Image: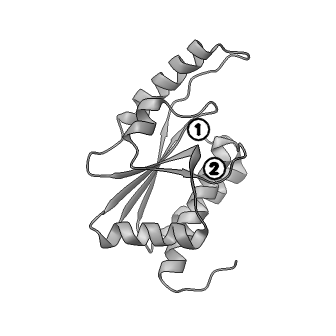
């Protein structure tokens, strides 16, 4: 299985880069794991809806260049479906059993994802109704993917 996380913006904080690198290393024994970063746009404070749509559109175009036709795309969206870790693991396992060999997760920038990316997604996933920094979500997602592989392999992992 090949798994990509496509994220808007660079991770600036060292502790987040280190955490993501640790989960990437751990995932190496289960799948081909890759992080793809696309440039973000500066969002002015109190930006109008029109400016925000334009920013999301530009970021969406950058994301779209990395989306593969043969990939199952899971976009992180606040209005997506919330899953337990076990159900998330089962979803990944089911995809593999039904012939999916490439999953791409998409994390938008600070104002979210463009509608075109949300429409392209095969699945919308939400970690919470709360808002989290998109950089932090990269590490949380990497951890949950690792946890899913541990669950699917029947290996112990702290709860």
- Residue at image x 67%, y 40%? 12
Write down the quadrant of residue 20 in the picture. bottom right
Q: Which of the pair 32/75 is nearer the observer?
A: 75
Give the x, y percent position of residue 126.
59, 51
- Residue at image x 56%, y 59%? 142
* Neighbour tally class for label 2: few under 14, some 14-19, many 20 plus, Cα within 10 Å: some
Q: Which residue is mark 1?
A: 10
Q: In the displayed structure, does residue 71 sit left or right of residue 125?
A: left
- Residue at image x 55%, y 86%? 155
Q: Which residue is mark 2?
A: 137
Give the x, y percent position of residue 17.
63, 51
- Residue at image x 35%, y 34%? 65
For marks 1 and 2 on the same chain, the one whose residue lies earlier in the sequence: 1
Q: CA distance from mark 1 to mark 2?
A: 13 Å
Q: Which of the pair 7/17 is nearer the observer?
A: 7
In which quadrant of the rendered image does the C terminus lie?
bottom right
Give the x, y percent position of residue 79.
59, 44
Q: In the rendered view, tell whether residue 108 sits above or below residue 41.
A: below
Q: In the rendered view, tell whether residue 158 sits above or below residue 103.
A: below
- Secondary structure, mark 1, is loop
Give the x, y percent position of residue 138.
59, 50
Write down the quadrant of residue 46 in the picture. top right
Q: Which of the pair 68/128 is nearer the observer?
A: 128
Q: Which of the pair 61/114 is nearer the observer?
A: 114
In which quadrant of the rendered image does the N terminus lie?
bottom left
* Neighbour tally class for label 1: few under 14, some 14-19, many 20 plus, Cα within 10 Å: few
Q: Is residue 26 visible?
A: no
């Amino acid at each position: 299985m090949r798994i990509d996380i496509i994220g808007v913006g660079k991770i600036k904080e060292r502790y987040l880069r280190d955490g993501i690198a640790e989960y990437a290393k751990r995932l190496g024994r289960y799948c081909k794991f890759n992080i793809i970063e696309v440039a973000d746009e500066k969002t002015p404070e109190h930006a109008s809806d029109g400016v925000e749509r334009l920013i999301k559109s530009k970021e969406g175009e950058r994301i779209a260049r990395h989306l593969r036709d043969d990939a199952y795309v899971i976009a992180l969206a606040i209005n997506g479906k919330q899953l337990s870790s076990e159900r998330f693991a089962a979803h990944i396992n089911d995809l593999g059993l039904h012939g999916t060999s490439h999953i791409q997760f998409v994390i938008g920038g600070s104002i979210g994802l463009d509608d075109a990316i949300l429409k392209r997604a095969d699945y919308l996933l939400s970690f919470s109704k709360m808002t989290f920094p998109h950089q932090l979500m990269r590490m949380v997602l990497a951890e949950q993917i690792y946890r899913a592989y541990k669950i699917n392999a029947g290996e112990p992992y702290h709860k």
